[in-house]
């Protein structure tokens, strides 16, 4: 009966109810939609970083991370084969060389990261597998081919088939240089990636640097990134060699993992801000509804209604407002996320600014169930909690006061 | 008859050292040999020199005096002696590696690969131009394009194309060699055969006991008012210089 009274009461002033419903709906929608956008940005960042020659787990020489020079390459990568053989069935791995080098042609020269890759294996792990849009991908025994990014190609004013000379420090401490022919051009999510990386085959890099069969890292991509820590532990258990260190992507990408945490904080703050704005509106509305019905509440009390029930009645009104608001807000939020899930929000116009933060050109919002649940709970529980204030006020009216009230 | 034959043989033997010198024979000479000769002539066995380097830009110009020691194509040592601000800055080159010394911090720095293609002391010469000076002999295939005349000398225009796997950035070089082994001009082309920069030698006169272009100028192709000019003030060719001159210790001690 209380619920029925509450339901009927809120529709006594239709316009006021509609206004506060709109406020709740917009609030909930903003929470869900903006939350999904932030998650989308963060997710994309993680995906990009993992696909940009990181992988979920990496095996490196213990000293390589602090001092990534040729002396700190993995000494005997073949010895790790048994460990890699025991990986989960859906995991893939590859070995690669990654060193800083200088690329030069007749007119330009610039620092790049030289990546010596195993073309077949790398294609299944990194972005490079399907990023080549001009020319061709590297063949298995391509000793002179090199793949460069579109931005680098433009910067160097060169084109397919032209020569690029790479220089770096060789294993013997001398300058190692080698001429490559551009066989392919790749496109990447970030321009900085296009400028940064050049790809050659692993044997070509090893010959150039005179490193024998040494590599700088072994990267592993798992079926599910959440397993990274567990798999890394089992790899650690299987390695006796103290010079080999196993890193998970969270350790390899400290910036990205801390940005992820920062986004968690952002989303919470965002929820609270939206809720505070919405909460004041809600309390105000209910308070108004209570004060214009002083005589009514006095009547109910004099008819013998217990104060507890008066509180319950006012809370019921607020419950309906919040319930309808969150429901419609959720539906709207999910609908707008769904609408954008295909194409995303194209921010190419601001690409350079976005790149600074390592973000993609296109944001595709991602809904985390945990965000939706916490948004709804925040609105609902806190909403009811603050409605207690007008409700208690309503319960305190005595019949005498109500009669005196005009 | 026998004696006559012997005389002819002796005559031929005497002639032999001269015949391989293709210029005397008048046929088309071997381009690779011409280039090697020119580089050897220009480098000598060893040399000491005092050079004034002028870096000219549209809005500024600066001049420094450099003392240089070279030995063959592999070793060289340079020091700035003037202006006082830069005095003592040195560069040591051994083979294809280079070190620089800065007296202000009293440090020798080995030039990493990343700096090899940067300008040497702000000039139009790159560190690579110095470090890989023997590259023109080893990394290129030379052919004589045309032979022209200039000031009563034959000038061989030689087209030098890098060997397929050679780690050089140029698509082609064109050398202008005078028949007395003097390098008059070196053009650097990119892979589209567009001219990138040109080095020219001029004011050929007796220097250090042989004819030598006193002024060298390196100029980028697209700009007219930017160049770097080397002007030899003193040049001496020596039979040899001690190896200990071309060491890091010597680089440090001389700069101090």
Image: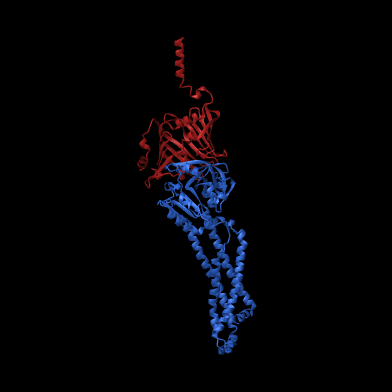
Chain colours: A blue, B red
Q: Nearer the viewer, residue B216 or A261?
A: A261
Q: Position of residue A158 (x, y in %)?
A: 56, 44
Q: Is residue A303 above or below residue A204?
A: below
Q: Nearer the viewer, residue A252 or B171?
A: A252
For residue A5, which quarter of the picture?
bottom right
Q: Position of residue B161 (x, y in %)?
A: 53, 35
Q: Nearer the viewer, residue B177 or A213?
A: A213
Residue at 48 percent across and 46 percent down: it is: A101
Q: Is residue A251 above or below residue A331?
A: above
Residue at 49 percent across and 41 percent down: it is: A178
Quarter containing the C terminus of chain B: top left
Q: Is residue A279 above or below residue A336?
A: below
Asked if residue A386 can be seen in this view, the reply is yes
Q: How many tags in the picture?
A: 0
For residue B113, which quarter of the picture?
top left
Residue at 50 percent across and 65 percent down: it is: A265
Asked if residue B119 can be seen in this view, the reply is no
Q: Position of residue B23 (x, y in %)?
A: 50, 24
For residue B120, which quarter of the picture?
top left
Q: Position of residue B249 (x, y in %)?
A: 35, 41
């Amino acid at each position: 009966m209380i619920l029925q009274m509450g339901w009927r009461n809120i529709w006594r002033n239709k316009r006021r109810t509609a206004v506060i419903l709109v406020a709740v709906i917009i609030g909930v929608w903003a929470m869900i939609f903006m939350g999904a956008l932030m998650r989308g940005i963060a997710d994309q960042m993680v995906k990009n970083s993992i696909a940009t020659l990181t992988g979920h787990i990496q095996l490196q020489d213990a000293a390589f991370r602090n001092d990534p020079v040729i002396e700190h390459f993995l000494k005997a990568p073949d010895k790790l084969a048994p460990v890699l053989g025991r990986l989960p069935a859906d995991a893939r791995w590859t070995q690669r060389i990654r060193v800083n080098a200088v690329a030069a042609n007749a007119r330009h020269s610039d620092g790049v990261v030289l990546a010596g890759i195993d073309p077949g294996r790398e294609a299944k792990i990194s972005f490079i597998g399907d990023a080549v849009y001009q020319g061709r991908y590297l063949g298995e025994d391509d000793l002179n081919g090199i793949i460069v990014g579109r931005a680098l190609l433009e910067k160097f004013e060169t084109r397919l088939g032209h020569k690029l000379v790479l220089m770096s420090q060789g294993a013997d401490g001398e300058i190692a240089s080698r001429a490559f022919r551009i066989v392919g051009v790749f496109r990447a999510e970030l321009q900085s990636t296009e400028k940064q990386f050049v790809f050659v085959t692993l044997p070509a890099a090893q010959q150039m640097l005179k490193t024998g069969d040494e590599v700088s890292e072994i990267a592993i991509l798992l079926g599910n990134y959440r397993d990274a820590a567990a798999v890394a532990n089992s790899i650690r258990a299987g390695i006796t060699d103290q010079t080999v260190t196993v890193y998970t992507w969270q350790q390899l990408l400290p910036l990205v993992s801390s940005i992820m945490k920062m986004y968690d904080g952002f989303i919470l703050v965002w929820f609270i801000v939206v809720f505070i704005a919405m909460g004041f509106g809600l309390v105000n509305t209910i308070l108004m509804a209570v004060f214009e019905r002083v005589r009514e509440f006095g009547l109910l009390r004099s008819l013998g209604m217990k104060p507890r029930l008066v509180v319950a009645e006012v809370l019921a009104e607020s419950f309906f407002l919040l319930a309808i608001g969150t429901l419609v807000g959720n539906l709207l939020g999910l609908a707008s996320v769904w609408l954008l899930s295909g194409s995303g929000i194209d921010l190419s116009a601001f690409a350079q600014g976005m790149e600074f933060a390592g973000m993609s050109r296109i944001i595709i919002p991602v809904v985390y169930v945990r965000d939706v649940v916490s948004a709804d709970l925040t609105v609902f529980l806190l909403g009811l909690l603050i409605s207690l204030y007008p409700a208690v006020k309503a319960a305190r009216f005595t019949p005498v006061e109500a009669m005196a009230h005009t | 008859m026998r004696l006559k034959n012997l005389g002819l043989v002796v005559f031929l033997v005497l002639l032999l050292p001269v015949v391989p010198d293709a210029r005397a024979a008048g046929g088309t000479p071997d381009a690779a040999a011409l280039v090697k000769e020119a580089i050897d002539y220009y480098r000598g066995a060893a040399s000491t020199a005092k050079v004034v380097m002028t870096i000219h830009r549209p809005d500024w110009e600066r001049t420094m005096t450099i003392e240089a020691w070279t030995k063959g194509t592999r070793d060289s040592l340079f020091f700035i002696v003037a202006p006082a601000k830069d005095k003592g800055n040195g560069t040591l080159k051994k083979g294809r590696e280079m070190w620089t010394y800065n007296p202000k911090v009293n440090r020798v720095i080995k030039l990493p690969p990343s700096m090899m293609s940067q300008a040497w002391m702000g000039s139009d010469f790159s560190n690579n131009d110095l470090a890989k000076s023997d590259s023109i002999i080893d990394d290129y295939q030379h052919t004589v394009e045309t032979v022209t005349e200039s000031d009563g000398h034959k000038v061989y225009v030689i087209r030098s194309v890098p060997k397929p796997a050679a780690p050089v950035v140029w698509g082609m070089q064109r050398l202008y060699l005078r028949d007395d082994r003097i390098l008059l001009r070196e053009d650097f082309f990119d892979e589209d055969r567009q001219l990138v920069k040109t080095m020219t030698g001029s004011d050929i006169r007796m220097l250090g006991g042989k004819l030598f272009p006193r002024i060298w100028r390196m100029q980028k192709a697209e700009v007219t008012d930017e160049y770097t000019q080397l002007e030899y003030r003193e040049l001496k060719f020596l039979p040899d210089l001690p190896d200990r001159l071309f060491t890091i210790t010597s680089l440090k001690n001389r700069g101090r």
